[in-house]
Structure formats: structure tokens, C-alpha cells
Image (cartoon, rainbow, N blue to C red):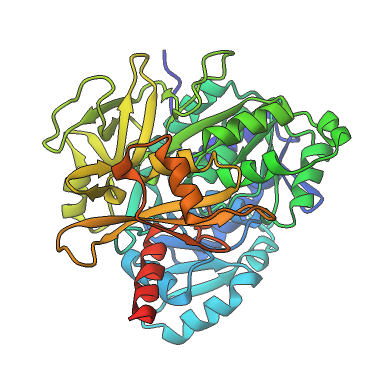
């Protein structure tokens, strides 16, 4: 018989009763037990109810990583509210759009976001309230009886996560308790999470990948997480890896690339207690996997997901010899995937098409966007917008974003396929390919490759063109190579192709 799924805040309460003294979160040298984090969640819940929170009200979290963020997240849910984590790297105008679109009534923030909050308050058009996370956390839970917190159903919306908006205005994905917990339980099963595991968390908590994999997973298994404000300085991450005896390292490809290239002293590697590394949020080049595993002797498994799927869809198996670098593994238990053509018809093994997903992790829909919801979820299938292919063993190979597809003389060019090859060139540190309109022929596209070279390495456009000619078809080779010092990235390491297209248009304007 399947175990009943409890709402997220009740999961925390259950663990607080079962293992009250065990450390759940370690932050800036202090340990917070499951009981202490549960108490703090109730402090935030009580505060919101005193402020007049109504069931279903949307409460935003605008903050860097901190223990109060996690407590507030569970507290908002406990009070009957809905959590809206906001990317704290956005401008105040971008944040304002999200808050207005979601009808947010209260914002919890930290000191680092106070400048953004000041600008938001100047634009204020309603009666939205702003509260400091640390100040609320310091409140006493009171000597009297706790208020009766409302009962929550697992199928209620717990979280609204706004997509990055790479193809337009951001949209709020509506995720239920069941979506997130079912996803975390399935991931636990595949990568064998236990109460002995210790996670280090430096990716931003506002991201679905971080919260599901690095907070909900350890919560479900009664494990510990060492929470850091961010990835910089990286020495702090290394220190946590050693001092906190971290067993599970979750990061994005950029971090693994740096580690694979870093000449880390041998004794540091000996001190590590890692059993597994997981990569997500952006494509991971096979070269990086090979180099990282050779250097650290720890399995590095690539997974795939998207916000609308809570977010994990697949991951490479942990069992020896079962991982297939170059793929994002198999779907998690309980998740079905299919590759379809433009009409939604299934395609045979090995044929590229759009990846569609079905399972308990698929969102309810987009907030206030019925048309977008109907377009994205059809007959229970989530249309991901990613081009992929399935092999005969059911492993998924992501080829590219459907929106990033470039059509050159009527032929499909998937940028990631070309980028993957170019990453193998010894002089290339980073690269990203975009499609732009042909200068002289309407309706046609050209491939443009932005390239960051390794320090002290040289390569010309001809060198790179000749290298690609050995490995990919002629029509896939970019028309131009543009060398730059860095590429624009999101907080989770995804290269912002939309921004590269802006760069290219601006470059064209300067030349004309």
C-alpha cells in the first residue's frame, strides 16, 4: 500500500516529531534541528495569520539563500498561503511584473534585496506589505496556545514558480504539494537517498531544481543540508564539502566545468566524502563528465527537468555501467515520456521530435493563462518545447530547445549538437550558437557561434570552422564566429540565447 502524501509543511512537522534533534539545516556555522525549523515555520505562519492572511493568498520570497527562507517557505504553506519564490537577481521592474501578475499581497525579503524593495515600494499601487525575513524569524512563537493552522490538501497549489521568460513574458507555473513531493520521492528512489546523506546547497533557493532536489529530498529522508549564501567564494563550498562530510553534491554544468579544469591539491580530494554528483538546469557536455569523473573518481549523473514538471523528469541511473553520458538518462518512476511530431503523433525510436511528459509531477497549469495552459498541457501530456530522441533502452537524448532550432536552407540545425562538438576543441572554454535572419534573403537563417577561448589559448574562426568540418555536416557549421570574454547566463548557469540575439542586433546596428 502506498504511503499517504502529506502537504509539505506537515512533512516537516512529521520529521520534527520523529527526529527532533537531528540537524536539518546548517547555515553560517549554526545548526538548526528539524524541531527548530518546524518551530520557525510556525512563527512565520502565526505572523501571517495575525496580518490577516486569507487562504490561497500569494506570498513572495525575495531573498538570497538563508535559513529563514526555508522556514518562511514552510510557514507560508502552514498558514494556508501560496509561496512565490522570486529570482532576487531580477531588476525591480521585472520583479514588479511578477508581483503584479500573481497578485502578491505580502513580500518577505532580506537585507541584500532592500534596494529592490525600496524601488518596489515607490511604485506601489496597492496595499502590498513588505517584511524583513530576519525580523520575523526573531519573533517569539508566544507563550500562549498556537493558532489553529488550516488543514491543507496535497492537491492544493503550494508554489508558483515563474519561468525564466526566454520566449516572452514569464509565466507562473502552478505546482501542488503532490507535484513536488511525488517528484522528490521518485528522485530519492533512483539515487538512493538515505538519512545518512549530507547535501551542500549553494544554488539559489528560488529555483525549482534547487528546492526540490536540495531541500525537499533531504526533508523526506531526514537528511541534512549545509546551506551557503551562494557559490562565491568557491573556497567556502570546498570547505563545506570537507568539514560537513558532504555525500551528495548538486550543481550546474558551469561548476563541474570549473572543477574539472581546476588543479585542486590531491590531499583535498582525499578528504572528500562524496558518493554522488548530480548535474541539472542546463546541458552538460560529455567532455566535462569524462574529465570530472577522471579527476574526482565520483559518479557524475546528468538529469533533465523543467519548472513545469516540478522539475525532474529524468536522470541517469546510479548503478555501475548503467549511466549513458550524452543522454539525460531514463524517466523517473511513475513518469511517462514520448517523442512526437508537430501534429502530436508518436515518433519511432531514434527519431528527433518534441519531448512530452506525463506524470504526477506535471503542473496544474499557468496562473491566469488558460490559453498557454491548453497549448502546453494536452490530454495530460506536458509539451516541453525540447527536441529530443529516445534510444532503444529508453534513455533520453536532448537535442535542443524547439525555439532555438535554426533552419538553414530548409535543413534543421540543432545548436546544442554543434556546441557539443566545439566544446571538444582544446582552445574553446565556452560557446553558444544562435540563429539570426539572413541579411539578404528573407525567410532564411544563418548560424552564429559565440565563443569564449581558454586563457593562453588561441584559435581563429578558420581553425574552428575546419575543426567542425571534420565532425558535422557542412550546413551545420556557423556562418560566423564571434569571440567574446564571457557569455550571458541566468542564475542557474543557462546561457541566455535571447540576450545573445540582442548582442548580435546591437553589433549589426553599430556596423551599419
In the rendered image, which quarter is residue 353 located in? Answer: top left
In the rendered image, which quarter is residue 364 located in? Answer: top left
Of 371 and 490, nearer the camera is 490
* The N terminus, quarter of image: top left
Q: Is residue 76 above or below residue 3?
A: below
Residue 126 visible (yes or no):
no
Tell me what residue is drawn at x 32 percent, y 41 percent: 474
- Image position, residue 359 (x, y; %): 32, 29
Tell me what residue is drawn at x 34 percent, y 31 percent: 360
- Image position, residue 276 (x, y; %): 65, 27
Of 168 and 349, nearer the camera is 349
Q: Is residue 321 above or below residue 38?
A: above
Q: Is residue 174 above or below residue 170?
A: above
Of 87 and 167, nearer the camera is 167
**From this viewpoint, which residue is outermost toward the right?**
267
Tell me what residue is drawn at x 18 percent, y 53 percent: 370
Residue 358 visible (yes or no):
yes
- Image position, residue 130 (x, y; %): 52, 73
**From this viewpoint, which residue is outermost toward the bottom?**
122
Relative placement, left or right, of 116 versus 509 is: right
Relative placement, left or right, of 183 versus 429 is: left
* Number of numbered discs overlaid on the protein picture: 0
Of 329 and 144, nearer the camera is 329
- Image position, residue 221 (x, y; %): 61, 28
* The C terminus, quarter of image: bottom left
In the rendered image, which quarter is residue 100 located in? Answer: bottom left
Amino acid at each position: 500500500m502506498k504511503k499517504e502524501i502529506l502537504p509539505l509543511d506537515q512533512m516537516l512537522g512529521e520529521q520534527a516529531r520523529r527526529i527532533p534533534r537531528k540537524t536539518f539545516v546548517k547555515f553560517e556555522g549554526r545548526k538548526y534541528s528539524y524541531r527548530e525549523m518546524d518551530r520557525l515555520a510556525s512563527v512565520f505562519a502565526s505572523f501571517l495569520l495575525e496580518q490577516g492572511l486569507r487562504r490561497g493568498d500569494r506570498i513572495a520570497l525575495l531573498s538570497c539563500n538563508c535559513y529563514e527562507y526555508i522556514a518562511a517557505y514552510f510557514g507560508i504553506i502552514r498558514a494556508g498561503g501560496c509561496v512565490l519564490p522570486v529570482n532576487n537577481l531580477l531588476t525591480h521592474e521585472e520583479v514588479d511584473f511578477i508581483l503584479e501578475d500573481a497578485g502578491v499581497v505580502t513580500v518577505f525579503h532580506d537585507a541584500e534585496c532592500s534596494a529592490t524593495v525600496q524601488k518596489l515600494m515607490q511604485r506601489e499601487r496597492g496595499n502590498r506589505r513588505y517584511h524583513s525575513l530576519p525580523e520575523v524569524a526573531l519573533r517569539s512563537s508566544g507563550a500562549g496556545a498556537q493558532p489553529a493552522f488550516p488543514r491543507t490538501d496535497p492537491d492544493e497549489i503550494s508554489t508558483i514558480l515563474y519561468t525564466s521568460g526566454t520566449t516572452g513574458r514569464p509565466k507562473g507555473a502552478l505546482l501542488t504539494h503532490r507535484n513536488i513531493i511525488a517528484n522528490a520521492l521518485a528522485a530519492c528512489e533512483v539515487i538512493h537517498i538515505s538519512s545518512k546523506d549530507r547535501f551542500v546547497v549553494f544554488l539559489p533557493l528560488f529555483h525549482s531544481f534547487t528546492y526540490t532536489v536540495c531541500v525537499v529530498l533531504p526533508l523526506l529522508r531526514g537528511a541534512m543540508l549545509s546551506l551557503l549564501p551562494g557559490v562565491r567564494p568557491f573556497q567556502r563550498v570546498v570547505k563545506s564539502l570537507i568539514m560537513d562530510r558532504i555525500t551528495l553534491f548538486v550543481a550546474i554544468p558551469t561548476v563541474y566545468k570549473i572543477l574539472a579544469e581546476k588543479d585542486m591539491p590531491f590531499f583535498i580530494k582525499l578528504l572528500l566524502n562524496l558518493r554522488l554528483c548530480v548535474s541539472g538546469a542546463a546541458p552538460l557536455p560529455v567532455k566535462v563528465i569524462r574529465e570530472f569523473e577522471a579527476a574526482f573518481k565520483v559518479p557524475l549523473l546528468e538529469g533533465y527537468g523543467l519548472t513545469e514538471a516540478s522539475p525532474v523528469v529524468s536522470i541517469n541511473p546510479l548503478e555501475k555501467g548503467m549511466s549513458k553520458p550524452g543522454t539525460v538518462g531514463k524517466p523517473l518512476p511513475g513518469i511517462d515520456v514520448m517523442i512526437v511530431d508537430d501534429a502530436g503523433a508518436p515518433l519511432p525510436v531514434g527519431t528527433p521530435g518534441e519531448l512530452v511528459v506525463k506524470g504526477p509531477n506535471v503542473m496544474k497549469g499557468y496562473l491566469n493563462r488558460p490559453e498557454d495552459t491548453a497549448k502546453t498541457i494536452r490530454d495530460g501530456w506536458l509539451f516541453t518545447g525540447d527536441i529530443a530522441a529516445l534510444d532503444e533502452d529508453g534513455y533520453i537524448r536532448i537535442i535542443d530547445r524547439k525555439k532555438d532550432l535554426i533552419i538553414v536552407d530548409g535543413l534543421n540545425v540543432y545548436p546544442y549538437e554543434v556546441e557539443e562538438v566545439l566544446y571538444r576543441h582544446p582552445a574553446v572554454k565556452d560557446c553558444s550558437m544562435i540563429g539570426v535572419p539572413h541579411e539578404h534573403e528573407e525567410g532564411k537563417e544563418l548560424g552564429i557561434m559565440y565563443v569564449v577561448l581558454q586563457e593562453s589559448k588561441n584559435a581563429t574562426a578558420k581553425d574552428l570552422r575546419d575543426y567542425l568540418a571534420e565532425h558535422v555536416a557542412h550546413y551545420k557549421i556557423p556562418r560566423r564566429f564571434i569571440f567574446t570574454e564571457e557569455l550571458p547566463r541566468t542564475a542557474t548557469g543557462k546561457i541566455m540565447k535571447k540576450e545573445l540575439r540582442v548582442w548580435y542586433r546591437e553589433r549589426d546596428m553599430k556596423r551599419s
